[in-house]
Image (cartoon, rainbow, N blue to C red):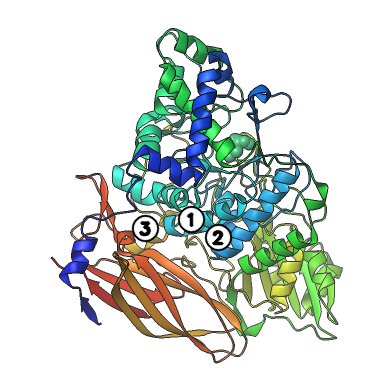
């Protein structure tokens, strides 16, 4: 194992540097948020604040139901446009009309492709804008700390780095169209108790595991706004959590935009507690979706001197910044039906779905299926002909046309025949299954199994598939040895009873409006599957930390997902980062070097990747870093620290590069309340999943 000793200058650069330092001054923070217009924008806001009455200011700090719901009023006479919000993690919300329903975010997480996600963000933003809405409530970037979380499908996965990179892609695209609200800040990972749970969390776990993706997206994508979550963190509701909102988000990170509360997450004032005062002091800038603690209560608190007018001005200023820095006054969203569900958007939905599907098993070369005359394909299972787009909660998006798996297979079958067999028990049907060359069983989860609390089902009861799903698989297994299981759903499932028995398994997630076509193209081999799991699938739920969605007080540990399984030496069913292909890849010649790029200490990683099979494919090259001799505890055995993709023709080799700043190796040091890079040996591991890392190289940061 090569050990690379670094020069002292490198150490000097690395020591003490953490994540990017916050902007040194409030002015720099505003510049970073607003771009070069910031001086003029701030001057305009100063003038407006001098001119506005107190009640005009207060009006801008909370939502209203009229003339449209989810609106924050503007003041036409002062040239201040309203904010008209709508949801959209998988497409413009159904509440505004039909739109392109993309595969859900967890599916897009499986693409490991932030550039594709940028295009999706742009398209969703364009459709939101074409509905006359000027603010998009997405993306959701909460860590999937347990796969039973009801909103698992809305986020990109379990790893904070991957979440940060994918979320950055989405925001960069979406904000070319409309400003976005990044959600939900923070530690919002349980549905059933989301309004009542208090999460106790230590600073390292908070900063490294639950906040770092927010920080990355804010820094790299100039996010317009952040939504505070329903839950409490360390004893304080997030809408009034001063250490989190004012302390971390605004003062430490330098976020200069507004914080918007999650819908109806505020609490009415009591005789002894003024949540109005607390929320204003904490930095809640906009209360949604109607005033509960702002409105008249805020006006009174200002009049009585309980909320300083300067504090009110700051809330208003941030909402105005969002409007003017994003040009909502001069470039308003205009309704334009021609921009909705365009051919390009549907093609992108299909591309995303194709890229998101993860081939988990493929024995005996059953896939891809030949499209030849005489090939007889039977499609069965409870979801074979169902439009299964995902949750019916706030992320619900509906398309005019949804291609089901059955429809997609029929449309793409060429000379092969496709027959829908609706039962697995009627004699005529069992005969067809027995005679089939391939039996495609489409099953999994629906919005009846998982979703947002209050508006949908909430958390899943278990990681097992629902009984009808298991029944359909076992019936097919009894009748055929050519069984391809297609799983839909938003998160990991356990697979005991069939995982090593069926011939193939494809994770298709909630695949969006074009999912049926995408699935067919994967099964017929027009597309070589390249999706990778953005979460570990455990063998049994007991292999993961306990998921407590009942208690109103829970404590989060440092490890979850693949890190927890690695730490305990527990084999996953399918590892984080895993996905098969119709080809195979080889890795060789890993080189890890320290480089100084314009004064920034970076680690440069290069590796040769070869397509060792006979069809073209796309490999996701993954870089993990461990610290075997670290004095810091706890540490995960390895953390994902970078990934990239390469398209390779059969037999081709390409040298692939991943580079990261040394500061990305930092841990949160509680003594100094900063990210610090420990002088120790860093083990760089490269390969195709968190459990298939054939190449390793150590790099020492020695004192
Ligand atoms: C959800 C948010 C959503 C909001 C508006 C809340 O229930 O938690 O994600 O943006 O509703 O629909």
- Is 320 left, or right, of 428 in this rendering? left
Front residue of 438 and 562: 562
For residue 14, side relative to residue 59 (left or right): left
Quadrant hosting ligand 1: top right
Could you tell me residue 99's position as x and y percent?
Answer: 76, 49
Determine the residue positioned at 58% across, 30% down: 263
Q: CA distance from mark 2 to mark 1?
A: 8 Å
What is the crowding at mark 3: few (fewer than 14 residues within 10 Å), some, or many (at least 20)?
A: some
Q: Is 336 left or right of 193, judged from the image as shown?
A: right
Q: Position of residue 232 (x, y in %)?
A: 42, 32
Is mark 2 in CB contact (under 8 Å) with mark 1?
yes
Classify 665 as above or below 648. above
Q: Which element is circle 2 on?
A: helix
The disc label shown at residue 109, or none: 2
- Which tag, 2 or 1, sits closer to the chain's start? 2
* Mark 1: few/some/many CA within 10 Å (<14, 14-19, 20+): many
Q: Which residue is mark 3?
A: 564
Task: Kindly indicate the quadrant of the structure image that contains residue 275.
Answer: top left
Q: Secondary structure at mark 1?
A: helix
Q: Which residue is mark 1?
A: 163
Disc with the residue nearer the chain's start (3 vs 1) = 1
Location of the C terminus (image quadrant): bottom left
Q: Position of residue 570 (x, y in %)?
A: 38, 64
Farthest residue to the left: give it.
Answer: 703
Q: Residues within 10 Å of mark 2 (few under 14, many from 20)?
A: many
Label located before the other in sequence (3 or 2)? 2
């Amino acid at each position: 194992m090569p050990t690379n000793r670094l020069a002292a200058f490198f150490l000097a650069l690395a020591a003490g540097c953490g994540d990017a330092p916050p902007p040194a001054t409030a002015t720099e923070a505003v510049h970073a948020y607003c771009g070069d217009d910031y001086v003029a924008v701030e001057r305009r806001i100063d003038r407006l604040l001098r001119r506005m009455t107190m009640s005009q200011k207060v009006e801008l700090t909370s939502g209203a139901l009229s003339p449209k719901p989810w609106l924050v009023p503007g003041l036409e006479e002062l040239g201040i446009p309203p904010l008209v919000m709508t949801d959209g993690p998988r497409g413009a919300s159904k509440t505004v009309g039909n739109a392109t329903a993309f595969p859900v975010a967890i599916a897009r997480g499986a693409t490991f492709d932030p550039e594709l996600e940028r295009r999706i963000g742009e398209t969703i933003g364009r459709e939101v804008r074409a509905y006359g809405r000027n603010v998009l409530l997405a993306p959701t970037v909460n860590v999937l700390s347990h796969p039973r979380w009801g909103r698992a499908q809305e986020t990109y996965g379990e790893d904070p780095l991957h979440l940060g990179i994918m979320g950055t892609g989405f925001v960069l695209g979406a904000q070319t169209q409309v400003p976005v609200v990044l959600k939900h800040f923070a530690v919002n990972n349980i549905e059933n108790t989301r309004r009542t749970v208090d999460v106790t969390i230590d600073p390292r776990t908070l900063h490294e595991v639950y906040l770092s993706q927010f920080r990355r997206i804010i820094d790299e994508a100039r996010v317009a706004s952040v939504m505070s979550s329903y839950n409490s963190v360390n004893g304080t509701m997030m809408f009034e959590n001063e250490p989190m909102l004012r302390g971390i988000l605004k003062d430490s990170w330098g976020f200069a935009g507004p914080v918007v509360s999650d819908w109806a997450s505020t609490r009415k004032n009591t005789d002894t507690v003024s949540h109005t005062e607390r929320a204003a002091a904490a930095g809640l800038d906009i209360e949604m979706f109607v005033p509960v603690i702002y409105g008249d209560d805020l006006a009174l608190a200002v009049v009585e001197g309980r909320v300083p007018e300067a504090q009110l001005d700051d809330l208003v200023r941030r909402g105005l910044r969002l409007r003017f820095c994003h040009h909502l006054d001069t470039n308003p969203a205009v309704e334009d039906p021609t921009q909705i569900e365009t051919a390009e958007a549907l093609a992108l939905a299909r591309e995303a779905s194709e890229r998101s599907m993860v081939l988990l098993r493929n024995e005996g070369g059953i896939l891809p299926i030949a499209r030849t005359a005489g090939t007889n394909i039977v499609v069965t299972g409870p979801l074979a002909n169902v439009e299964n787009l995902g949750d019916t909660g706030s992320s619900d998006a509906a398309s005019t046309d949804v291609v089901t798996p059955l429809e997609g297979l029929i449309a793409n079958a060429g000379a092969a025949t496709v027959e829908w067999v609706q039962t697995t028990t009627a004699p005529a049907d069992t005969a067809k299954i027995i005679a089939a060359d391939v039996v495609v069983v489409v099953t999994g989860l629906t919005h009846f199994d998982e979703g947002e609390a209050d508006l949908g089902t909430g958390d899943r009861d278990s990681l097992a598939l629902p009984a009808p799903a298991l029944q359909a698989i076992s019936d097919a297994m009894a009748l055929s040895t050519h069984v391809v299981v297609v799983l839909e759903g938003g998160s990991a499932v356990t697979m005991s009873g069939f995982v090593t028995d069926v011939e193939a398994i494809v994770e298709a997630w909630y695949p969006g409006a074009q999912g049926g076509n995408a699935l067919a193209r994967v099964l017929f081999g027009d597309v070589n599957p390249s999706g990778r799991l953005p979460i570990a699938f455990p063998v049994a739920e007991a292999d993961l930390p306990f998921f407590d969605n009942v208690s109103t007080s829970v404590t989060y540990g440092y490890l979850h997902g693949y890190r927890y399984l690695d730490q305990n030496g527990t084999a996953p069913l399918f590892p984080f980062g895993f996905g098969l292909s119709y080809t195979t890849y080889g890795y060789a010649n890993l080189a890890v070097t320290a480089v100084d790029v314009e004064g920034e200490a970076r680690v440069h990683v290069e590796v040769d990747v070869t397509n060792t099979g006979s069809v073209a494919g796309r490999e996701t090259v993954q870089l993990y870093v461990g610290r075997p001799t670290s004095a810091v505890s706890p540490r995960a055995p390895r953390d994902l620290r970078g990934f990239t993709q390469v398209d390779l023709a059969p037999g081709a080799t390409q040298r692939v590069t991943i580079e990261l700043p040394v500061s990305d190796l930092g841990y949160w040091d509680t003594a100094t309340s900063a990210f610090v890079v420990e002088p120790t040996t860093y083990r760089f591991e490269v390969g195709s999943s968190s459990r298939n890392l054939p190449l390793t190289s150590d790099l020492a940061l020695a004192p």
